[in-house]
Amino acid sequence: MIIIDDFLDQEYLKQIQQDIPLLEWGLHGSSPGGNLNFFASYPKDTLYKKLYNKVCNLQEIKYNTNMVSRWYVNCNPSGKQHAGNWHTDCNNGITALFYPMPWNSRMYGGGTAFKNPDETVEYKENRLVLFDGNRLHRAVEHTSNMRYSIAFKIIGEWNEDSINN
């Protein structure tokens, strides 16, 4: 797992923060157990192109076909009943999960939990988390109004040269 804080410049981050609540949302139940408490949006706006390109150019990833297979914005309501189900994203590939919004993890909770090994990554504004797409993970319950994240499913493998340096 790789965590990159302060991933975007502040001006661009603010533009995304202002846009996310205005997106069109639909039920997202791709997790095992059919958790329909997540909502997703697939923005086609060019506002997100810079973020997409920055993820596509990460030196930590060696792209097999130089592509992100899909990406979307998650919206997760508060409460224990809305915690995510354990799931994997893909058998071969890497997931990049971006936390765009201002957040107080001590007050709200709402990170991402992982298994094998068990650990939790705190939700922190402007943080990008890269992990193996076949690793079990889920959204942790939170007490804020909404928890937003942007997920990228990447066809590629780790660039060992950049990870070891």
Image: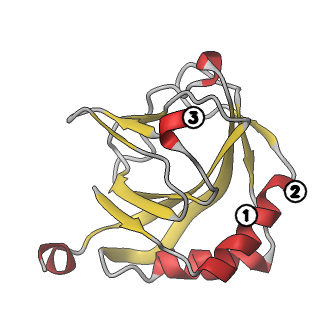
Q: Distance between the residues labelled 2 and 3?
A: 22 Å
Is 64 on the left or on the right of 127, as rendered? left
Three-letter amino acid code at the position of disc 1: Gln
Query: Going by the picture, which residue comes out furthest to the left?
Result: 164
Depth check: give the residue in front, 139 or 142.
142
Q: Where is residue 99 in the image (x, y as percent from the top left)?
A: 55, 56
Question: Mark 2 against mark 3, which lies toward the viewer?
Answer: 3
Q: Position of residue 105 (x, y in %)?
A: 50, 41
Depth check: give the residue in front, 144 or 84.
144
The answer to whether mark 2 and mark 3 are in CB contact below 8 A is: no
Q: Which residue was labeled with disc 2?
A: 22
Name the residue: 42% across, 65% down: 155
Which of disc 3 and disc 2 is earlier in sequence? 2
* 95 versus 15 height, above or below: above
Three-letter amino acid code at the position of disc 2: Leu
Q: Which residue was labeled with disc 1?
A: 17
Look at the image and name its color scheme: secondary structure
Residue 87: name its quadrant. top left
Q: Helix, strand or loop at disc 3? A: helix
Q: Which residue was labeled with disc 3?
A: 108
Which of disc 1 and disc 2 is earlier in sequence? 1
Three-letter amino acid code at the position of disc 3: Tyr
Which of disc 3 and disc 1 is earlier in sequence? 1
